[in-house]
Amino acid sequence: MKLCYLLGYPVEHSMSALMHNASFQSLNLPYRYELKSIPPSGLVPFIENELRLPEVKGANVTIPHKQEVIKALDEIDETSSVIGAVNTIVNKRGRLLGYNTDITGVHRALRESFGSLHDIKVAILGAGGASKAVSYLFAKKASVISIFNRTLKKAESLAVTLTSLPECKAEIQALPLKYEALENAVKEADILVNTTSVGMFPKSNETLVCKTLLHSELFVFDLVYNPPQTRLMREAAEMGARVIGGTPMLVYQGAEAFKLWTGRDPPLELMFRTLKESLGAG
Ligand code: ATR
């Protein structure tokens, strides 16, 4: 039996095991995906002692380990290195390679539901790990990116990092998560992305953006996948905006990891159906 892990702290809420184990079974692959709740002090020892074993094909990495994990790996790909975060590890004959499939997950989800990202204006809520992947993708294509964060310093430092990239095409500004600042940027924006955990189960009634700021020219992308429809998504739809939730990104980042571990094309429809059923929306 080959093993893939999810390394996080905590990991109990994760849907990834359901999605991957259903996929392994449907393709008759002798693989198992296991959740590993590892406190920060245990991360490097776990990687050294377990991840290089021949029966381990790799791992996904989630909060809070996406940045810290890098120092324990042998090599990371270019995008992981630019944004400083890895969410997928592949054990290649004892060598540990790091990738960031969050970026491809976001890109594919947006390409399918929104279209071209060239020259658009984007408002991003949050400046943590997920925001880094999202804003890096937009930096290469959009014309204006406004990054809003409760802790302004983090948004400022992300804006500086992105602006200094040679491939950055966008004008990037860091703003406080305040009504007045949001009002201007959201009014002008083509896409509003929520990368924070606000609105996530069990605090499903929370939102960072006042409903009256949302409008019919806006496309709202909420990375939260539980509940499948957040308050932000519901209110945006009520104001005439197009909306998507976090499920497509979750599936597509998982699908790319699946392909890296197994070399096989993942059963996407099954992945979507498994999530939908377990989130109670199917
Ligand atoms: P992730 O990897 O999922 O992005 P993270 O790196 O911990 O997780 O980032 C969480 C993001 O959600 C941050 O931007 C955080 O804001 P701070 O930088 O000010 O902490 C944001 N966030 C979380 N809870 C929030 C809340 N209740 N209100 C506003 N922002 C919140």
Image (cartoon, grey):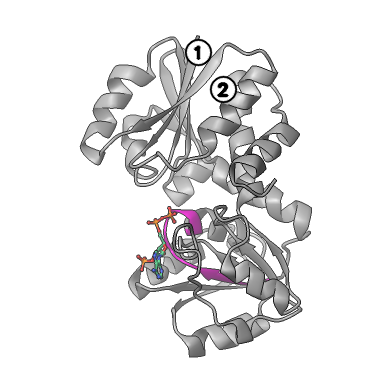
Q: Nearer the viewer, residue 98 or 126?
A: 126
User: Is residue 230 positioned above or below 3 on the image?
Assistant: below
Helix, strand or loop status at disc 2: helix
Q: Residue at x 67, y 74 (%)?
A: 236
Rounded to the nearest angstrom, the CA distance separating label 1 from label 2 is 10 Å
Residue 49 percent location from the top left of the image: 28, 18
Amino acid carrying label 1: it is Lys
Disc 1 and disc 2 in contact, CB within 8 angstroms: yes
Q: Residue at x 32, y 36 (%)?
A: 71
Residue 186 lies in the magenta-colored region: no
Residue bearing mark 2: 261
Between circles 1 and 2, the one closer to the viewer is: 1
Whichever of callouts 1 and 2 sits on the residue coming sooner in the sequence is 1
Magenta range is: 121-131
Horizontal side, residue 238 vs residue 19: left or right = right
Residue bearing mark 1: 2
User: Is residue 182 positioned above or below 257 on the image?
Assistant: below
Q: Residue furthest left?
A: 41
The answer to whether residue 45 of the structure is visible from this angle is yes
Residue 245 percent location from the top left of the image: 64, 57
Which quadrant contains ligand 1? bottom left
Amino acid carrying label 2: it is Trp
